[in-house]
Amino acid sequence: MHELALAESVLHIVETTAKRESLISVQEVVLEIGELAAVEPEALQFCFGSVVLGTVAEGAQLRIVTKAGEGRCSDCNRTIWLKDRHLLCPQCGGAHIHLTGGDRMRVLEIAGK
Amino acid sequence: MCGTCGCSVNIKPGKRNASSVGTVRQYRNRQETDTETRRVRVEQDLLAENDALAAANRSEFTLRGILALNLVSSPGSGKTTLLVETIKALDGACPVAVIEGDQQTDYDAERIRATGVEAIQINTGKGCHLDAGMVGKAAQSLDLPDGAVLFIENVGNLVCPASFDLGEAAKVVVLSVTEGEDKPLKYPDMFRAARLMLLNKCDLLPYVQFDAERAEAFARQVNPHIEIIRLSAVQGTGMEHWLAWLMRERQQKSSCI
């Protein structure tokens, strides 16, 4: 739902990096999205295509790589992979899981000239 | 084909003419341009800028003993009515100010101002949430005394505001009994991010098919640490528990100055 705002954040990072690196055009943007980051990759792709028009990243390909959700169960003290935020611990059935990764979004790299 | 660089000019062995040199040069230029494509590592979080602004807001609020609460819910849960009734019940016990977030209109800020409390309206336009930058600017333009309670009424939306830290001390999620009791399971991010859930419009429980116990169990399933208070802002029942929670939180903040 807030993919437009996120696409604008991606563009802001890309524009800042391109300026710093003296790139005049950007061909590819690699974005890492956590599986628990509450974002819809298809909607983000669509919004990205719109926000880059007329910018240094116009026509750039947005490549999305996903990162699995990761948590730590404070009942059994194990690290577990999470497909869902409100899952019980698959090892011990505990509900006290602290999210440790896979809930963020990062621009990993850009390619340009 | 040129045997030196692969260009389309057929160069006879032992002979170089001007045009072929030019073509080779053009090819080399093109090749150099191609090799100029660079990959730059960035590794920057999308929310990093918002998080930095939120951290600045939080440190300002903490320094001044201001309790900032981010009120979130779906549209129509009764957030503004709850705030109006809360301000009336506080009856000047502490300084209060309100930041209102809506896509359009300043109706909500007007309702708050009618209670005599300062309110500022942020219109997000097409935006579906408030962000830390908007709140920082709004807080600066409010005349906030030290030790104040700052209510931030977010845009009615159970999805996006969960991802944006505003620098608040806590998110308070309002769920009303006229909604589905399974909202905590349908929108787990929001209920996981909240410290307190206010179950509002409880005066309507006899008239609606809403199992309050079940709603609370769902909320605890996604967030075992969530605190829950049942109330009715309109009738006033349960408001004393909410006010006691507020005062407790405020005391903790003011004692930090």
Image (cartoon, coloured by chain):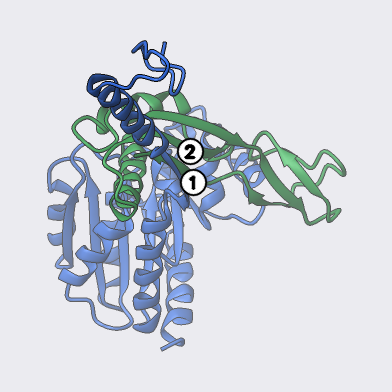
Residue kind at label 2, given as amino acid type: Leu
In the image shown, does A39 or B4 lie closer to the viewer?
Answer: B4
Q: Is residue A102 left or right of residue B34?
A: right
In the image shown, does A18 or A12 lie closer to the viewer?
Answer: A18
Which residue carries the number 2 mark? A31
State the image coordinates of residue B89 (x, y, percent, origin top left). 31, 67
In this picture, is B140 found above or below B207?
below
In the image shown, does A10 or B168 lie closer to the viewer?
Answer: A10
Q: Most extreme residue toward the front, as rendered?
A: B14
Please identify the quadrant where the N terminus of chain A is shown.
top left
State the image coordinates of residue B67 (x, y, percent, origin top left). 38, 72
Point 82% across, 38% down: residue: A90
Chain that the image shows in green: A
Which numbered dot is residue B3?
Answer: none
Label whose residue precedes the other's in the sequence (2 or 1): 2
Q: How would you rate the neighbour count of disc 2 (Cα within 10 Å): few for under 14, some for 14-19, many for 20 or more?
A: many
